[in-house]
């Protein structure tokens, strides 16, 4: 089944997997394929390495969706009937924008954004990227400007934080520690106030910075937006489990990415998140399960190539077939562990994908019918 069939009726596609398996390229190729079919698509990446921009033939991407010029696709021979928009998440900027949206008035907004405590805290929180990524995803989906939003996630171990982010945010705002700051009461608060008061007084004399005042203003202003944050977290959690959302797991056939893919599928099940399919990238295509008889192959090639070259060709072919057998075993394991009967296989392409032409080749494999994909794999293996 093609990726297009797997995404029928979906508004949000979250692409997850281990680092270095081609998630960003796959995300961009899926976006390209859907846009080519006439959809209005936004693809969001948090990859600071600018792989998405490079793959789309752009110098850079910003924190707001930017429409990719259709002429770039036409130059690469790709007809795009819809629209493809792309952005690279600026975690700090997105967090600031969320504060701006949730603040009840201009005074509250300025008190938070200009506060020294917030400026330090927001950098640390936004640096985790998971919360800001899903906040942006939620915003793009709710705005309704796109038929499909595709999110390129962090490596899968960090993506687990992505799944937990709404609950962690809610726990933070409903936690006792924050409530103590917002509404101090009782003996503990008095003791804390005396102790911290002495410390802050000393700091103020030494540094000239009134941290106690900053903390007081920050937490007072924060109290006015907690309900908005909690509602946002609930909305994001609902979106992740929504029938219109799906997770695609991307992996390569190497052992570590395969283990990560299996681990992540288990976590998706635990979190009751919708799993939409498996994409195995960089597969070495081959034929047959028997080992190559190198001496016999060398002998058969010697008349045409000469003994030395025939030996090298036979050895290289044997090594390629060994890799193909290894990949088939890895794919069989993935099918069993992930309970997937029809993974989408993308062969190892020549060179990195760094332009729209390369992206179009990946998209061709992802959106091919079963029969067409078989033909493309056979072609990659030199069998067609």
Image (cartoon, helix red, strand yellow):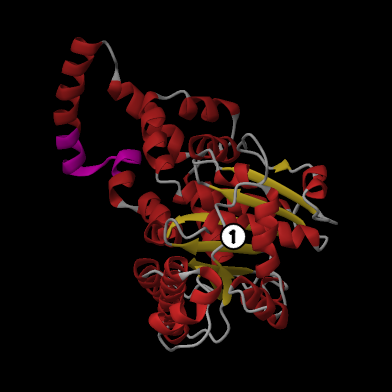
Pick whichever, 122 or 254, lies toward us.
254
Q: Residue tagged by mark 1?
A: 26
Q: Principal SS element in the magenta part?
A: helix
- Residue 337, image quadrant: bottom left
Specify the quadrant that holds the C terminus. bottom right
What x and y, as percent, mark residue 157?
37, 60
Q: What stretch is highlighted in magenta?
A: 180-192
Pick whichever, 195 or 352, lies toward us.
352
The correct choice, above or below, for 355 with respect to 208 in the image is below
- Residue 216, image quadrant: top left
Residue lying at 73% horizontally and 55% vertically, measured from the top left? 41
What x and y, as percent, mark residue 189?
21, 39
Q: Is residue 39 visible?
A: no
Specify the quadrant that holds the N terminus. bottom right
Q: Is residue 108 left or right of residue 355?
A: left
Residue lying at 52% horizontally and 58% vertically, measured from the top left? 22
What x and y, as percent, mark residue 248?
55, 69
Q: Can residue 50 be seen in this view?
A: yes
The correct choice, above or below, for 40 with respect to 342 in the image is above
Q: How crowded is mark 1: few (under 14 residues within 10 Å), some or many (20 or more)?
A: many
Q: In this view, does 165 lie to the left or right of 211?
A: right
Query: Is 185 one of the magenta-colored residues?
Result: yes
The correct choice, above or below, for 239 with respect to 233 in the image is below
Q: Is residue 197 left or right of residue 120?
A: left
């Amino acid at each position: 089944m093609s990726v297009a069939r797997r995404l029928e009726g979906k508004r949000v596609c979250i692409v997850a997997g281990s680092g270095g398996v081609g998630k960003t390229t796959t995300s961009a190729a899926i976006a390209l394929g859907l846009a080519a079919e006439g959809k209005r698509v936004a693809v969001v990446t948090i990859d600071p390495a600018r792989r998405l921009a490079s793959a789309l033939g752009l110098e850079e991407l910003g924190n707001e969706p930017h429409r990719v010029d259709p002429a770039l696709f036409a130059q690469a021979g790709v007809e795009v009937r819809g629209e493809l928009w792309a952005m690279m998440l600026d975690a700090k900027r997105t967090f600031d924008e969320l504060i701006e949206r949730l603040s009840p008035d201009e005074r509250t907004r300025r008190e938070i954004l200009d506060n020294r405590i917030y400026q330090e805290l927001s950098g640390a929180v936004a640096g985790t990227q998971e919360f800001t990524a899903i906040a942006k995803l939620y915003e793009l989906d709710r705005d309704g400007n796109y038929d499909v939003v595709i999110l390129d996630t962090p490596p899968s171990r960090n993506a687990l934080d992505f799944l937990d982010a709404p609950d962690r945010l809610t726990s933070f705002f409903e936690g006792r520690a924050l409530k103590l700051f917002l509404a101090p009461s009782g003996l503990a608060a008095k003791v804390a106030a005396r102790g911290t008061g002495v410390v802050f007084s000393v700091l103020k004399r030494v540094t000239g910075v009134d941290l106690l005042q900053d903390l007081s203003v920050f937490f007072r202003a924060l109290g006015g937006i907690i309900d908005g944050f909690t509602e946002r977290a609930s909305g994001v959690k609902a979106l992740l489990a929504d029938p219109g959302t799906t997770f695609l797991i991307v992996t390569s056939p190497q052992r570590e990415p395969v283990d990560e893919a299996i681990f992540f599928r288990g976590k998706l099940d635990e979190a009751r998140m919708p799993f939409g399919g498996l994409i195995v990238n960089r597969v070495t295509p081959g034929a047959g399960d028997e080992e190559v008889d190198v001496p016999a192959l060398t002998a058969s090639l010697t008349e045409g190539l000469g003994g030395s070259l025939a030996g090298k060709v036979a050895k290289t072919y044997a090594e390629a077939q060994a890799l193909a057998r290894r990949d088939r075993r890895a794919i069989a394991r993935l099918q069993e562990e992930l309970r997937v009967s029809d993974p989408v296989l993308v062969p190892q392409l020549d060179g990195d994908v760094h332009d729209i032409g390369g992206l179009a080749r990946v998209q061709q494999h992802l959106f091919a019918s079963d029969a067409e994909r078989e033909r493309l794999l056979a072609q990659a293996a030199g069998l067609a």
